Amino acid sequence: MDETPPESRPVVVKPDRNRNAALADQALPELQAALGPNGCLSGEALTGIGPLSDSSGHAPDGLPLALLRPASVEDVAQALKICHCYKLPVVPQGGLTGLSGGANAGRREVALSMARFAGIESIDPVSATMTVRAGTVLETAQRAAEEAGFVLPIDLGARGTCQIGGVISTNAGGCRVVRYGTTRDNLLGLEAVTAQGQILSHLSRVTKDNTGYDLRHLFCGAEGTLGVVTRAVLRLWPRPAQRETALCAIDGFDQVVALLKRARKCLVLQAFEVMWRDHFVMSGGGSLFADPPPLAVLIEAEGDGLSAILEDAFASGEVTDALIAQSEADAQAFWAVRESRNPSQSLHDVLNLDVSLPISTMAGFVDDCGAAIRGLDPAADVYFFGHLGDGNLHVMARMPTLGAEGKAALQSFAYPLVRDREGSISAEHGIGTIKRDWLGLSRSEFEIAAMRGLKAAFDPQGLMNPGKLLPEAFSL
């Protein structure tokens, strides 16, 4: 897949397991002394403390060498200096809600959790910004913004668990990108610590800052391969005086696109979410309409114009039925269907794809991908849904006949379909390990070579989240 000329590739250092074990034995006492008894856990102390791997279902065999839990930026810097000195690979971790294997630490690696370094440091109501620590749970930051009269627009289904550092490191998107953009679009300032323990701090609160290379955007989406995000300045937005939410039944994808065009023209859209019938029924929406529609669309908009727009959409044949939320409880019930909060069956064994496509090609992708899945496994269950307003489509598939081979089979035909439609193999969850070997379908050889160059500049020993993101990353 990756045909980068050998001379442009970094040298990959093969791990010496005996040497790594000896270095770990030397490093652990120093890490424990630097971080304290609650800041460096190893051995039996790692059992019973909760998950140590992300939600991808690809947990490594065994436990990491240690779990570092720094309580300050200085702790992070000191820990990374020690790990760098002893050449210990470090895997940054947030809320462990990712689906790409990017936060998983192997047996000879050190996991670094930012959970103890959490909290809102300040809210500036004049510049409409929030300075927040990396370990802060997204929902906590959202509530603080609301109490101050603002909206923190970054919003994900995992809002109650994911952490700001992980959200930034994966450049998370979510439900409201159509209105506010991705995390990158709402990131004004950033502080991070490099592999050598150097603190890069540019916690700017200004929108216009044209002072050379934008380091915050290098770390945003880098999945911890360049360093550890520690603090950030996020943009806040005025809280809408009024918001309307509706759930619409629609007969065909052309009508969905027509409704999106109408809504974009006439409304301040907050969200425009689409669900194909199987997902809508599985997620508990089957009884909301007399008959489950081929497609269901959840619209959220500022102001009070949504009802009038839907009347016009009825008259034009774009919508066959609609429910308009009469309360916040109604709106939450609609969102519960979209986010599969109460599925009719367990989703623990489903395979997930997270892709982006030009909207004009999405219906064809759904048809081709669904047919391919059922061709491989006639017993498969397939669910399509996503953030149509920004072209992000999610695919969930249960392929019981294929078992453990299902994921590889799904990727092998789905990602080329994405490439052929000029889409992206990762819209929200990053590359990690699961999509690493497919990166060449969305990025050119020269782009990947440039990424390797950045990796080498920030992390010359390849210690930060090794084996993630890049098809041929440094490893020790």
Image (spheres, helix red, strand yellow):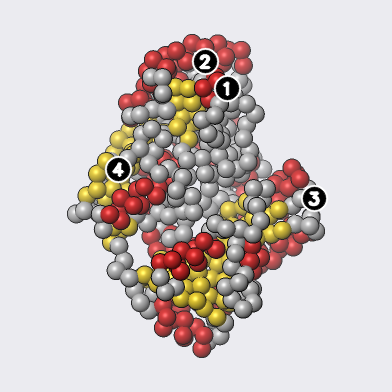
Query: What is the CA distance from the residue labelled 4 to the residue labelled 1?
Result: 34 Å
**Residue depth check, mark 4 versus mark 1: number of the one nearer the observer:** 4
Residue placed under numbered mark 2 in the picture: 24
Question: Which mark, residue 108?
Answer: 1
Q: Are marks 2 and 1 in contact (CB under 8 Å)?
A: yes
Mark 2 surroundings: few (<14), some (14-19) or many (≥20) residues within 10 A: many
Q: Residue at x 44, y 48 (%)?
A: 160
Task: Give whichever of discs 3 and 1 has the lower sequence position.
Answer: 1
Residue farthest to the bottom, as pictured: 315
Amino acid type indicated by mark 2: Ala
Task: Give whichever of discs 2 and 4 has the lower sequence position.
Answer: 2
Task: Give whichever of discs 3 and 4 has the lower sequence position.
Answer: 4
Closer-to-camera residue (76/293):
293
Q: Quadrant of the C terminus?
A: top right
Residue placed under numbered mark 4 in the picture: 120
Query: What is the CA distance from the residue labelled 3 to the residue labelled 1?
Result: 34 Å
Task: Give whichever of discs 2 and 3 has the lower sequence position.
Answer: 2
Task: Give whichever of discs 2 and 1 has the lower sequence position.
Answer: 2
Tell me if residue 364 comes above or below residue 174 in the rendering.
Answer: below
Q: Are marks 3 and 1 in contact (CB under 8 Å)?
A: no
Q: Is 92 on the left-hand or right-hand side of 197? A: right
Residue 53: x and y, percent?
56, 35
Query: What is the CA distance from the residue labelled 2 to the residue labelled 1?
Result: 8 Å
Amino acid type indicated by mark 3: Thr
Question: Which mark, residue 401?
Answer: 3
Amino acid type indicated by mark 1: Arg
Q: Residue at x 35, y 77 (%)?
A: 304
Residue 227: x and y, percent?
43, 32
Residue 387 in view: no
Amino acid type indicated by mark 4: Ile
Q: SS for tag 2?
A: helix
Q: Is 269 on the left-hand or right-hand side of 248? A: left
